[in-house]
Image (spheres, rainbow, N blue to C red):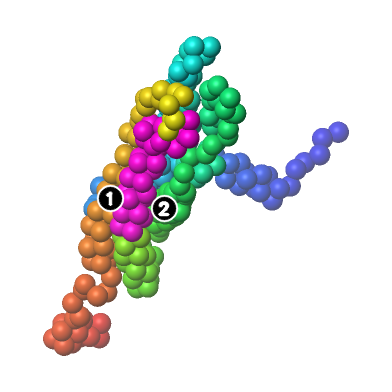
Amino acid sequence: MSTAVPSSTMDRLGGLAGLGKKNPFAGLRWRRLEEPLGFIKLLEWLFAIFAFGSCGSYSGETAATVMCKSEADTEIKLISVPFGYPFRLYRQRYEMPACDDMERRILHLTGDFSAPAEFFVTMGVFAFLYAMFALVIYLRFHEEYTKIRRLPIVDLCVTGAFTFLWLVAASAWGKGLMDVKVATQPSSLVSSMPLCQMEKATCNAGSSPYFALANISVLFGFLNFIIWAANIWFVFKETTWSKKPASKEESAERGEVEDH
């Protein structure tokens, strides 16, 4: 015995099936990416990823060699100290070898450069999130963006704030990276070991750390500043401040047209 399914139930099931097949990107107008405002927002989104990604994923290593001068111990000992983001170097420990009657000691690198590095990465993450949010608004809700006068003004204020913060973050991280390079030089590692200041051992600087990825992060930091600064003009053009108020003659003509 078959039971008929009500038509209302079938309509609901059909509606749910249609929602599952609906393309979530159908409402996005991708052609707006060809306009300056949309294209620059896309660049802001991408460059923010490169900035915080290259800084947050950096890791390096500094090294030195120690050879005791005693005849009983002529082995060359390699000391390598890894470090990386967030560059709290004072937490990076290494073991200083012993010569003759000396004891092995646990030493640490010197310096804490986490403040500029973490500020730079945090800045990049927030810029990435805002650029993605602004892209969705611009591509999906552009009509509301132009109709609601406050939205372009808020966008202008936020863009100006990010421009200033990118300059501060890139400059601070650039200075912090220079200090990291000085603190992690192999010569600095040699000079920090008391054994190397005595005549019991011969110490030589090892391979220097590679800072290519960290240098790229600073570069993208200043590129972000330039892009966000350039975007101020295009966002300003969307505000009511850049539009001339209608003259009395134009307002009168519009009123006559509406009356007719």
In this rendering, position of residue 108 left or right of residue 174: right
Magenta residues, start to end:
167-195
Q: Residue at x 31, y 54 (%)?
A: 171
Residue 143: x percent and y percent?
A: 36, 63
> What amino acid is at disc 1?
Phe
For discs 2 and 1, the disc positioned in front in the rendered view: 2
Residue 100: x percent and y percent?
A: 55, 21
Taking 131 as reference, is 201 above or below it? above
Q: Which one is nearer the viewer's eye here, 196 or 53?
A: 196
Instruction: Name the image quarter holding the C terminus.
Output: bottom left
Which of marks 1 and 2 precedes in the sequence?
2
Q: Name the residue under label 2.
A: 116
Q: What element carries label 1?
A: helix
Q: Is residue 214 magenta?
A: no
Instruction: Name the image quarter holding the N terminus.
Output: top right
Q: Which one is nearer the viewer's eye here, 150 or 187?
A: 187
Residue 255: x percent and y percent?
A: 22, 85
Q: Is residue 184 magenta?
A: yes
